[in-house]
Amino acid sequence: MNEKKDFQENIIPVLNQNPGSFFPGKKRGGIRVLFVGNSITKHAPKPEVGWNRDCGMCASSLEKDYVHLMQAEILKSHPKAEFAILQVAGYEWEFFKMSPADRYELARQFAADIIIMFFGANVDKQYDTMENPPKTFRRAVEDLRNYLNPDNKAVVAISQGFYIRPVLDAEKKAVADQYGDIFINLEDIRNREDAHGGFNHPGDLGMQLIADRFMEAIRPALKKAEETT
């Protein structure tokens, strides 16, 4: 009998996922959307682990990762929309000792109108049972949120992770509740075996489902922006 695959195991190394952390797109002068994530959001080619694309892992092409699916959808109603990616795998791994100001000034300067925060997978699993961590993940999420949104004018959506990490999800929800942000539930998606692709990351179906869920969450903000421009 074949052993059932453990989809909750993060098998991708956290270090050197990308050359840098901030990736802005074309300047168009419209609403600005910032995607804050990890390898699911953007991972440069890394042949030594078998990954040869430059997009959200593990979409079959750039156009099919959740970021670019969302961009294509947003551009239909906001043709001048601007986008940027902030890849925070390093922050997940080192948040005990790292401040967002250490690396993410360019993302702060982007001055996003909508911020989508979708990360957590690279937090050491030992954290989930740690009694007195030197810094909580909740504080790390809050610090990053406030650094990227210093005037508290952006619409912020904070999502559950693709991996099932109840401790992290609860701390992210606490931040969302504290600031009145959108909290996105992915429970049904991440429990679907067909949503998983290579490297225990979402495949094309998973990416589409995530994009649809995130679009549903931010659509009111997009509609409001449309009405005021």
Image (cartoon, grey):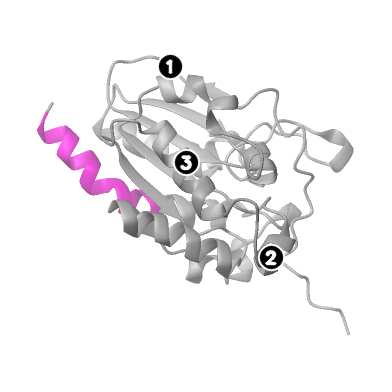
Residue 130's disc number: 2
Amino acid carrying mark 1 in the image: Lys
Q: Secondary structure at mark 1?
A: loop
Against 226, is 24 above or below? above
Q: Disc 2 versus disc 1: distance between alpha carbons?
A: 42 Å
Residue 148 lies in quadrant = top left
Q: Is residue 76 left or right of residue 148?
A: left
Q: With 86 as the anchor, is 76 left or right in this view? A: left
Residue 154 falls within the magenta-colored stretch: no
Which residue is rendered at x = 68% and y = 50% of the image? Answer: 122
Q: Which mark is residue 143?
A: 3
Mark drawn on residue 87? none
Q: Which numbered disc, 3 or 1, marks the residue closer to the eye? A: 3
Whole-percent x and y of residue 39? 65, 42
> Which residue is pictured at 51% across the width and 31% down the height?
85
**218 is within the stretch colored magenta:** yes
Marks 2 and 3, how far apart at CA: 20 Å
Dot 3 crowding, Cα within 10 Å, few <14, some 14–19, many 20+: some
Question: Identity of the amino acid at label 2?
Answer: Met
Depth order, front residue of 37/196: 37
Report x, y in % for residue 19: 70, 23
Percent x, y of residue 108: 43, 25
- Work out whether residue 50 can be spotted: yes
Residue, disc 1: 26
The part of the chain drawn in magenta is 212-228
Earlier along the polypeptide chain: callout 2 or callout 3? 2
